[in-house]
Image (tube, rainbow, N blue to C red):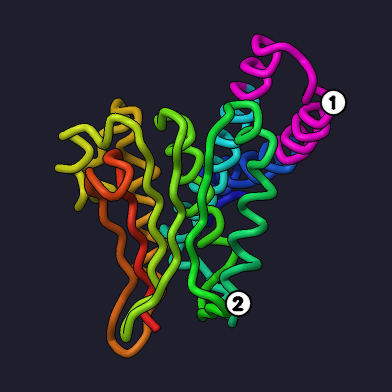
């Protein structure tokens, strides 16, 4: 972890520390999930505390993965593991990860997806991106979330809609945020959005790259997050 000048490479040290913290946090999240299964019949206050712990731990885990990925991207070493995946399997895993949180928050999550839909992408990164967007929707929605997956001639499209207050104006204006000008002080703006765009644009096919977009409205009247992956 020393550079050519014999000095400590703090970026590498930080990346190693983040990796270790992520492993510990994954064990914590698993413990929270196990605890959640024993709290199904507890009172609302206990359920709220559990939901809050699950949300914050999940956000921390996402943040650590983002830091590692951004470090690797900065080192020009953000490998993609592109393979063919059934969309239903990816969505089922995301829903299973958030089942306890959804139940304790009493959120209605509807999924609309084309049958037998498949695509070529990095399942780990795309799942992380979608999970982060879903957690945000669960945090800001009132009671309803809609997850849609469909395709057209050129793209595989994922949409996360909710019935919350929608994205603030500052976040809609940050639709094209870059690493040099993101505002980390804004709760739903900044690193997460930049990271989502980084993942999307890393997926390329036929001279076309993936993209994300933010909007308000949709069928539930709140925020609408859209991810497009070229096919």
Q: Which residue is mark 2?
A: 85
**Residue where numbered disc 1 is placed:** 38
Label at residue 63: none
In percent of width and height, residue 95 lies at 63, 50
Confirm whether the magenta stretch covers residue 45.
yes
Label 1 element class: loop
Which residue sits at x=51%, y=62%? 126
Label 1 Cα neighbours within 10 Å, binned few <14 / some 14-19 / many ≥20 = few
Count every numbered label the image shows and give the total.
Answer: 2
Please indicate whether residue 224 sits to the left or right of residue 39 in the image.
left
Residue 220: give x, y in percent of width and height.
33, 43
Residue at x-position 58% and y-position 27%: 105
Asked whether residue 38 is in view, the answer is yes
Residue nearest the viewer, comparing 79 with 225: 225
60 part of magenta stretch: no
Q: Are marks 1 and 2 in contact (CB under 8 Å)?
A: no
Observer-nearest of 179 and 152 = 152
Disc 2 element:
strand
- Horizontal and vertical percent for residue 143? 46, 31
Crowding around mark 2 (Cα neighbors within 10 Å: few <14, some 14 to 19, many 20+) is some
Precedes in sequence: disc 1 or disc 2: 1
Q: Is residue 104 above or below residue 126?
A: above
Among the 4 quarters of the image, the one containing residue 210: bottom left
Write down the region rendered in magenta: 25-52
Magenta stretch prevailing secondary structure: helix
Structural distance between the alpha carbons of marks 1 and 2: 33 Å
Residue 197 is left or right of residue 176, and the answer is right
Residue at 35 percent across and 78 percent down: it is 155
């Amino acid at each position: 972890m020393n550079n050519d000048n014999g000095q400590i490479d703090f970026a590498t040290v930080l990346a190693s520390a983040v990796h270790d913290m992520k492993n510990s946090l994954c064990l914590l999240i698993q413990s929270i999930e196990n605890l959640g299964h024993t709290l199904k019949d507890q009172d609302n206050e206990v359920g709220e505390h559990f939901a809050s712990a699950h949300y914050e731990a999940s956000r921390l885990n996402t943040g650590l993965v983002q830091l590692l990925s951004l470090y690797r991207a900065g080192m020009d070493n953000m490998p993609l593991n592109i393979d063919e995946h059934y969309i239903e399997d990816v969505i089922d895993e995301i829903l299973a990860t958030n089942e306890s949180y959804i139940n304790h928050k009493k959120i209605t999550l509807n999924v609309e997806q084309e049958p037998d839909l498949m695509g070529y992408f990095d399942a780990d990164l795309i799942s992380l991106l979608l999970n982060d967007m879903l957690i945000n929707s669960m945090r800001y929605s009132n009671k309803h979330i809609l997850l849609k997956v469909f395709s057209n001639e050129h793209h595989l499209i994922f949409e996360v809609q909710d019935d919350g207050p929608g994205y603030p104006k500052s976040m809609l204006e940050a639709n094209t945020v870059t690493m040099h000008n993101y505002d980390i002080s804004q709760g739903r703006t900044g690193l997460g959005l930049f990271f989502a765009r980084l993942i999307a644009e890393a997926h390329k096919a036929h001279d076309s790259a993936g993209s994300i977009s933010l909007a308000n409205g949709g069928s539930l009247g709140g925020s609408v997050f859209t991810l497009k992956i070229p096919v």
